[in-house]
Amino acid sequence: MDIALQYLINGLMLGVMYALVAVGFTLFFGVLDVIKFSHGDVLTVGVFTALATYLALRAAQVSSPILQLIVISVVGMAAMAALGAVIARALVLPLRLAPALNTLLITLMLGTVLREGVRLIFPDGSNPKPFPALLPTTAFSWGHFNLRLDSLILLVAGVAMIIAVHVLINKTKLGLAIRAVAQDGETARTMGINFTFVVLITFAIGSAVAAFAGVMNGLYYNEINFGMGLLLGVFGFSAAVVGGLGNIYGAILGGFLFAGLQTVGAVALPFASAYKDVFALAVIIAIMTWRPTGLIAEKSSERV
Amino acid sequence: MARPSPLPALAWAAVATLYGIVFLGAESEREVGALLALAAAAIALGARLRLVDKIRASIGSNERAFDVAALAGVLVAAFWFHEEHFVILMMTTALLLMVASLGLTIQFGYAGVVNFAGAAFLGVGCYTAGVLTKYTALPSFMTLPLGGLMAALIGSILILPVLRTRGHYAALVTIAFGILFKVFLEVNDTLGGPQGIQVKPLVLFGWNFNSPIRIGDFTASFYFSYLLLALVLLLISFALVRRLERSWIGLSLDAIRLDEIASACYGLDLARWKVFAFTLGNFLAGVAGAAYGHVLGFIAPNNFTFGDSLILVSIILLGGIGNLWGVAVAAAFVVILPEKFQVIQEYRFALYAVLVILILLFRPQGLLPRQLREYVGRAERLR
């Protein structure tokens, strides 16, 4: 029972992270019909930016954990928002009319550049780095079950972030513009919406959310490495696909579904946790085969 | 129109061979840099003087002569360096990567089936060679066909997902597979885990490929036999892929890549040709991988990362998708450059990724774009 609860917390945490990454994918797909494969690596850059900020703060004798936490999150997210907008401006928008394969390749290669950039620029970047535990680690115990305060805070913060994105997309004027562009870019333009601006701001939002997920991941596992974004990106994309691309609720649902499957797989399968990533990736391939465009299928009709 | 003379093509082959030999023999990084600058200047000048077009036309109508000249060029370079283990190893690696890239060309370039797990299929070949030589008493040259078959077989797991998905979704499936393969190798103890596995040398008709060659006064590096083997493999696959491209099969594959719906309307069986291209491409990668495993002698999961798969994709993009000579040149470039510029070695993944991004932004057809099929032109020329 206690173990089950532990798995539940772990699964929820994974679910929140996947959902946050998936939201990015789904936002980008919504406004531009593109898949940005470098999304996971933007997350990596974000979390390493946060770590660098932490080291700078520590060098500057700022020792209050709360202040540190706020500063590193804000810096990481702001930097990634800028990076996301730059990527959209420099690489994704110019290739709008090129074959889809080119966008795919260019973002894959960009992901490599970011990943390798982190590995090469960060001192000793090839090895995993410890990420500071900035949250209080007080544990509440019920019987044998321990719930650590930091896990709880992370979960709450993650869910709050998801809700914030939801509110932003559904209740604000900016969100209205984003939804309009997602529905029909041409018509949105004729209604006086600045298409380029909306696209850039969408990429900025998605990337900032990814950076948030990255910092969450770092705080939860207290260890980060340059390859973490690749795997999170693949899982996040799969989650977005499973829920139906372009649909935010689908992405969130997909994230939790995916985390659930992974957690159940890790518990139920006899060959232990060593194969957990293999299992998760195999599940992705199987789901993609079963429902090639997600559980909520993409409407596809082609004009010839 | 007069048939273009074979001279420019042959002269080009000779110059390229000479350049290759000087480049491979260059010791210091300053020399390598100067040689690169020289090549860039020569290409720019050649383009300005329309030499490139002339050479291209000459190659186009004197193919047989150019093929032989290119083969001769590789052999000359090989014999020039016959005692230099490292150079021979580099050349062998480049030749084998060309074979694997030809496989990817069938997939990406002709049928338009994306495969971002090229290194994984190369790895399947390598590990097949390793496992077969370690656990079985099969004659070791059997590892080559079996490596290819194994890659085709493992690839067939992906056939259904690849057939049912398109575009980004298909990319996701192959990316997931590529990562899965590497993680699997790392956690599987039978396959050596993260430390990897040893591959025993290739033995053919009692000849151990790892022993140095001594014929009379002539002695050659112990990699030399592998170089010849790689060259034979490349010849076979090059001929195969070129024949394929020019046959009605190639035409069908091109049609499917360019417009699935239209080709289905004309009665092409999409599934059949995609499976064909995917499987054949993986087979070639697997054969190359098995040979590569023997050459390396020791293989580990880290040789087959997602980054390596992307390098294979870079090769076919840099060369110009679907252009076989382009692939050959790009493979040589991609393998040899980091070895010559040790500074680059660490940065090679990032460097090639940047190169591909620049290519996609400014010259999406690649450095040596594939030529259009010309039916009318050729008929007129023959008249």
Image: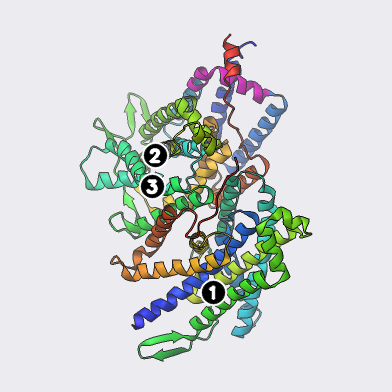
According to the picture, the residue beneath numbered tag 3 turns out to be B123
Category of crowding for the residue at label 3, using alpha-carbon neighbours closer than 10 angstroms: few (below 14), some (14–19), many (at least 20): many
- The chain letter for the residue carrying disc 2 is B
Between disc 1 and disc 2, the foreground one is 2
Q: Amino acid at mark 1?
A: Met
Question: Does residue B298 appear left or right of residue A83 in this picture?
Answer: left
The part of the chain drawn in magenta is B51-68
Q: Quadrant of the N terminus of chain A?
A: bottom left
Seen at 35% across and 65% down, the residue is: A274
Q: Amino acid at mark 3?
A: Gly
- Same chain under badges 1 and 3? The reply is no
In the image, B170 versus A297, the foreground residue is A297
Find residue A216 and name its label: 1
Total number of numbered discs in the rendering: 3
* Tag 2–tag 3 contact (CB < 8 Å): no
Residue A56 showing in the rendered view: no
- Residue behind mark 2: B279
The location of residue A7, given as percent across then percent down, is 39, 76
**Looking at the picture, how far across and down is residue A214, in whole percent?**
55, 69
Q: B267 and B19: which one is in front?
A: B267
Measure how far apart labels 1 and 2 are at the Cα level. 42 Å
